[in-house]
Every structure is written in C-alpha cells, then in structure tokens.
Image (cartoon, rainbow, N blue to C red):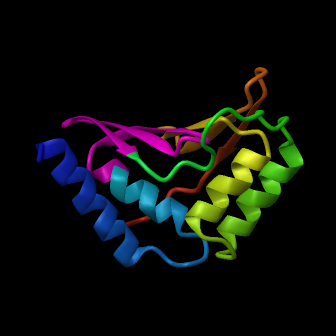
C-alpha cells in the first residue's frame, strides 16, 4: 500500500469518527485538507473517485449506480439542491446522495478543498457551485 493510500484512508477514518451526522461534510473536507488532499473528483454513475493529494493521486472505485448503456438524466438544478439539502440535514446516506445527484443530471463533481467549494457538472455544460463553511478540527 502506498503512502498516499495510507494517508487518505487514515484521514477518512478519522473524519468519520468526528463528523456530526447533520452538517458533517465540512468536517470530512477539513480533515482531508489537513491530510494533504487538494481535490476530490467524482464521476457518476461509475462512482469513481479521484483524490489528488500531496503524497500522490489515488483512485477509489465504488459500486456503480448504472451498468451497461443508459441515458444521462437532464440536469435539474432544483433536484440537485434538494439532494444536497437532504444530505446536509442527515436524512440520506452517501450512496443515496450519489444516486439522487445522478438522477438530477450530475455526471461529475469536483471538491476543491482550498477554495471550500463543490462544483457539480451536467453533461451539456451546466454547472452548479456551492461553498461550504470552514470548521475547526483539532
């Protein structure tokens, strides 16, 4: 196992231990940022996640949301915002959030840990950017 993978997995474990159920993403993001993760790129519906870190890049492959050939849902900004608010309220699991984002037409998203933003992309050039608050993590 590489130093990049060890570092990422340790940070993810720590973040999951300290993050609150409601509004927990900023805590996860801050722990990853402190561990040297600069960006996290998600590709839906494959559930492929690319972490860019100071130790090297790491890819994580999850269970795909779709298999075979499928139509891409149209981008629906309001449905995406609803999925975000549901997740932020602690009312969905992460896999449920990913599925709802996909149904809202998000084919990828990009977390910039320095800028504290998440940018969601539709396949026809649609973009929705949302910031998240800074939090203190010891």
Q: Is residue 118 above or below residue 32?
A: above
Of the 4 image quadrants, the one containing the C terminus is bottom left
Answer whether residue 56 is magenta in the image.
Answer: yes
Residue situated in front as seen by the camera: 130 or 124? 124
Residue situated in front as seen by the camera: 137 or 68? 68
The quadrant in which residue 88 appears is bottom right
Q: Position of residue 46 (x, y in %)?
A: 54, 41
Q: Is residue 103 above or below residue 56?
A: below
- The reply, left or right, for residue 53 in relation to residue 133 is left
> Which secondary structure is most common in the magenta stretch?
strand
Residue 138: tell me if it is visible. Answer: no
Residue that lies at the very extreme toward the front in this rendered image: 68
Residue at 67% from the left image edge and 55% from the top image edge? 99
Residue 48: tell me if it is visible. Answer: yes
Residue at 55% from the left image edge and 78% from the top image edge? 21
Residue at 19% from the left image edge and 43% from the top image edge? 4
Answer whether residue 68 is magenta in the image.
Answer: no
Residue situated in front as seen by the camera: 114 or 29? 29
Find the magenta span and give its range. 33-60
- The reply, left or right, for residue 12 in relation to residue 118 is left
The quadrant in which residue 40 appears is top left
The quadrant in which residue 76 appears is top right
Residue at 50% from the left image edge and 78% from the top image edge? 20
- The reply, left or right, for residue 87 in relation to residue 110 is right
Q: Position of residue 105 (x, y in %)?
A: 77, 39
């Amino acid at each position: 196992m590489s130093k990049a993978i060890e570092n990422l997995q340790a940070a993810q474990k720590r973040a999951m231990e300290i993050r609150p159920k409601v509004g927990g993403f900023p805590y996860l993001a801050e722990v990853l940022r402190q561990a040297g993760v600069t960006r996290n790129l998600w590709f839906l519906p494959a559930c492929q996640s690319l972490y860019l870190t100071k130790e090297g890049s790491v890819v994580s492959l999850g269970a795909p949301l779709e298999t075979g050939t499928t139509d891409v849902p149209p981008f629906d900004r309001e449905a995406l915002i609803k999925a975000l608010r549901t997740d932020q309220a602690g009312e969905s699991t992460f896999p449920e959030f990913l599925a709802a984002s996909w149904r809202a037409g998000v084919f990828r998203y990009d977390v910039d840990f320095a800028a504290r933003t998440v940018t969601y992309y539709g396949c026809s050039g649609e973009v929705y950017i949302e910031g998240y608050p800074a939090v203190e993590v010891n």
